[in-house]
């Protein structure tokens, strides 16, 4: 018997869907912050890799433990790198069609969808809002860049070459 599996992190159209849904609710975020939020909307059970004290990430990880896929990868870092290719393609596609702005993940005035797709966006956001709000809260609290920022705390992206600034640069 042949099994057919769907992995949302390996589908550029699903990645574009997630990007548009996140752009719609955030009002605009940096691409690196989007990439981290997007990763955790697909793999919320990986939240414990974030370096942050508090029980909320553990509760969220347990809440979403049932979505852990049958086939799993060696590490979150390697999966994140694989996902980056799809995210780049999706963002380039959306920017080429002028649906999001060039500098950050923000919808343009050309973005318009029918009510059915808007309901799909809303359903995704409602399902994943605890995770999205948690990651965006960390981004607001610690910033994105530099040591102690979201890139550092998530352990998914390097922060060593970020521009150093005493104020948040995101």
Image: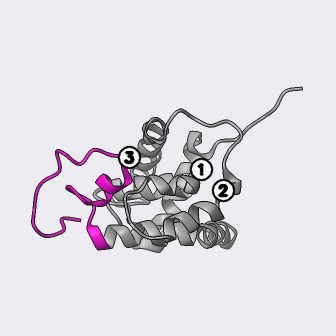
Residue 56 versus residue 148 in the image, above or below:
below
Residue 111 seen in this snapshot: no
**What's the magenta region?**
141-170
Question: Are discs 1 and 2 less than 8 Å apart at CB?
Answer: no
Residue 76 seen in this snapshot: yes
As for residue 27 lying within the magenta part, the answer is no
Of label 1 and label 2, which has the lower sequence position? 1
> Which residue in the protein does label 1 denote?
14
* Nearer-the-camera pick, 152 or 39: 152
As for residue 165 lying within the magenta part, the answer is yes
The dot on residue 134 is none
Q: Determine the image quadrant of residue 145.
A: bottom left
Disc 3 is placed on an element classified as: loop
Q: Is residue 89 left or right of residue 112?
A: left
> Which residue in the protein does label 2 denote?
65
**Crowd class of label 1 (few under 14; some 14 to 19; many from 20; radius 10 Å):** some
Residue at 45% across, 52% down: 49
Q: CA distance from mark 1 to mark 2?
A: 21 Å
- Extreme residue in the right direction: 1
* Nearer-the-camera pick, 138 or 1: 138
Residue 63 versus residue 70 in the image, above or below:
below
- The quadrant the C terminus occupies is bottom left
Q: Main secondary structure of the magenta part?
A: loop
Residue 96 locus on image (x, y percent): 40, 49
Residue at 45% across, 59% down: 37
Residue 35 locus on image (x, y percent): 41, 52
> Which residue in the protein does label 3 denote?
156
Colour scheme in use: one colour
Of label 3 and label 2, which has the lower sequence position? 2
Residue 41 locus on image (x, y percent): 54, 58
Residue at 62% across, 46% down: 8
């Amino acid at each position: 018997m042949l099994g057919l599996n769907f992995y949302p992190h390996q589908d550029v159209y699903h990645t574009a869907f997630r990007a548009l849904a996140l752009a719609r609710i955030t009002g605009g975020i940096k691409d690196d912050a989007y990439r981290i939020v997007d990763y955790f909307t697909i793999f919320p059970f990986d939240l414990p890799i974030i370096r942050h004290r508090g029980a909320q990430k553990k509760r969220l990880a347990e809440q979403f433990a049932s979505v852990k896929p049958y086939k799993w990868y060696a590490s979150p870092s390697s999966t994140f790198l694989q996902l980056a290719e799809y995210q780049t393609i999706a963002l380039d596609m959306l920017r080429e069609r002028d649906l999001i702005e060039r500098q950050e993940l923000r919808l343009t005035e050309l973005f318009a969808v029918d009510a059915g797709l808007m309901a799909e966006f809303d359903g995704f956001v409602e399902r994943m809002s605890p995770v999205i709000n948690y990651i965006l809260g960390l981004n607001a609290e610690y910033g994105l860049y530099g040591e102690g920022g979201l890139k550092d705390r998530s352990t998914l992206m390097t922060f060593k070459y970020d521009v150093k600034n005493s104020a948040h640069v995101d």
